[in-house]
Image: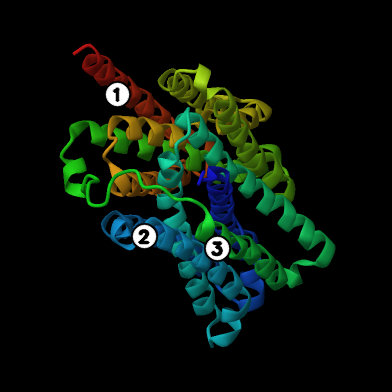
Amino acid sequence: MVKNYKKTLIACYLGFITQAITANFAPLLFLKFHKDYAIPLGKIALISTMFFLTQLIVDVLCAKYVDRIGYRKSVVASEVCSAAGLAGMAFLPELFHDPFVGILISVIIYAIGSGLIEVLVSPIVEACPFEHKEAAMSLLHSFYCWGSVGVVVLSTLFFAVFGIDNWKWLACLWALVPLYNIYNFAVCPIEHLTEEGQGMKVGSLLRVPLFWVSIILMVCAGASELSMAQWASAYAEAALGLSKTIGDLAGPCMFAITMGISRVIYGKYGDRMDLMKFMLGSGSLCLICYLMASMSANPVIGLIGCIVCGFSVGIMWPGTISISSKQFPAGGTAMFALLAMAGDLGGAFGPSLVGNITQQANDNLQKGMLAGCVFPLVLIVSLLIMRRFRSTTDHK
């Protein structure tokens, strides 16, 4: 019987779209929560923190337990949690005396699903018998970008047509995506990267010096991407005086579109490209974009830097996964979990650094962006170290 791995790809594509929904839907409602439930903005900021923290905890636990539980059960559970958390957002706040408790419970539930997706979907695709896996990985990760754009644009349209007061209906509609994908993951063929019990353990990986270079690459990939993505809207509003809606479309939406385009291009033509050179070029372009955003006196040029930065960071996360998969073929689930954790750490640390530097510079966002230059710079240096090691081992 010939296995249809296209079903596996479709399930994984929808998995990343699910992750985009869980990451981007609640932030669109922050002011609504503040107004309707009288939740202070300081507490509302905890929603993103809790989402992020839960994902990090799941990343760590996956490294230890996923191989014992099995990929299929774990990835089906990811969709169940995502659907339950999104639907719970519509109901749980009303069941508690403090609605914020209901919101946080919903966020934790779907963040568990998002964390499982982040760790599992990449190795599932990596284990499929495709040629040009680097290209397949890049195309896979582009679906997170398209999902992010879709959530912002379709949610904005829904609110414009039906009113933001009907947001609970939209939460239930978004929950249908992971609900449908439960079936996809239940029936599609799923392979394993290594034989049961043969994958490298966390301790073994962390004793390899070159793996720490992969960790640094992943931290810089997450930081380079999210430092710009999370501040792009504020930059568009502050530098150009745009409204919040237009700022979101000109900043984060365009950033996600250019990031998706980069991943699709490598997904389509990656078999003709050298991944290491593509990433070095992307890192250099990223550095230029940060310099444009931080040093240009012309706000339009700065905004162009923000938007093009999306293209430059597109290959960083999937590219690091592909390079590490080739370098550590026995890395198994532990490797993917540690890389996901490193990317999340970068995503937490990067925007925080930019925000703190901005605050210390009297709310000068350009100063914060200048500090963000350190991430693509370290990424370039790490890639050069990795390439030198590979060329040395190739000549042995």
> Which residue is identified by label 1?
386
Picture colour scheme = rainbow
Looking at marks 1 and 2 on the same chain, the residue that comes earlier in the sequence is marked by 2
For the residue marked with disc 3, what is the amino acid? Ile
Q: Residue furthest right?
A: 161
Q: Are marks 3 and 1 in contact (CB under 8 Å)?
A: no
Query: 45 or 345, which is in the foreground?
Result: 345
> Which residue is identified by label 3?
182
The CA distance from mark 3 to mark 1 is 38 Å
Looking at marks 3 and 2 on the same chain, the residue that comes earlier in the sequence is marked by 2
For the residue marked with disc 1, what is the amino acid? Met
Tell me if 236 is positioned left or right of 291 in this view.
Answer: right
Residue 354 in sight here: yes
Q: Residue at x 66, y 38 (%)?
A: 254
Q: Position of residue 251 (x, y in %)?
A: 65, 41
Q: Residue at x 56, y 30 (%)?
A: 267
Q: Are marks 1 and 2 in contact (CB under 8 Å)?
A: no
The CA distance from mark 1 to mark 2 is 28 Å
> What SS does tag 3 mark?
helix
Q: Residue at x 65, y 68 (%)?
A: 171
> Which residue is identified by label 2?
58
Q: Residue furthest top?
A: 395
